[in-house]
Amino acid sequence: MKNKFFKNYFIKISLILFVFSIFSDVFLNSYLIIKNNYESRLISSYGFCDKQGYGYIKKIKKNFNPSNVTLINYSNDFPLGEKLFLSINNDNKKMNNVIIINKHLKKTKNNFDNYQLIDQYQNCEYLQK
C-alpha cells in the first residue's frame, strides 16, 4: 500500500514537472544555451549595431582599444551599453573617442565636423578627434 502511494505520487509530480517544463520552454532554452556560445547570446540579446550596440562596441574595443570613450545611443528604448564593459569611461567632457549607436534614429544634429570617421558599420560609427 505504501509503495503504491509513493509510485502514484512520483508519477503525479513527474507529470507536473514535465508540463511545467514544456510551458516554460525549458527544452528550447536549454538547446539554445548549448548551441550558441556566450558571445552570440550577448549579441542576440544586446544587439550588434542596434539596441545597446554590444557587438559594435566589442568590435571597436578589440580592433582599436580606445580610452575615454563617449557612447551615444540615439535609441531611447535602451540604456547605454557602457555598463556591459567595465573598462569604458563615458566621459562627456573630453569626447576624444565617440561611438554612436542607432545613428538612423537621430533627431537633432550633433557637431562632429572636427572628428575623423575611423569605422562605420550600418547605423554605428566610431569617431576620433
Image: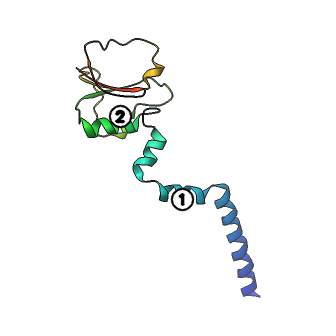
Pinpoint residue 72: horizontal percent, then vertical percent: 37, 24
Nearer to the camera, 24 or 49: 49
Residue 105 visible within the image: yes
Q: Residues within 10 Å of mark 1 (few under 14, many from 20)?
A: few
Name the mark nearer the viewer: 1 or 2: 1
User: Is 74 placed above or below 87 here?
Assistant: above
Among the two numbered marks 1 and 2 on one chain, the one whose residue lies closer to the N terminus: 1
Residue type, numbered disc 2: Glu
Query: Between marks 1 and 2, how big is the CA–CA gap?
Result: 30 Å
* 94 horizontally vs 74: left or right: left
Q: Is residue 17 above or below residue 66?
A: below
Q: Residue at x 31, y 14 (%)?
A: 112
User: Which mark is on residue 70?
Assistant: none
The residue to which callout 1 is attached is 31
The residue nearer to you, when weighing 12 against 72, is 72
Q: Secondary structure at mark 2?
A: helix
Identify the residue at horizontal 30%, vertical 40% (top origin).
86
- Colour setting: rainbow
The disc at residue 82 is: 2
Q: Residue 93: x and y, percent?
A: 26, 19
Residue type beneath disc 1: Tyr
How busy is the neighbourhood of tag 2: few (under 14 within 10 Å), some, or many (20 plus)? some
Give how far across and how far down residue 88 sits, in percent.
28, 35
Q: Position of residue 101 (x, y in %)?
A: 40, 27
Query: Which of these two is toward me, 119 or 41?
Result: 119
Say if 8 sits above or below 64 in the image: below
Element carrying mark 1: helix
Task: Classify residue 122 by image quadrant.
Answer: top left
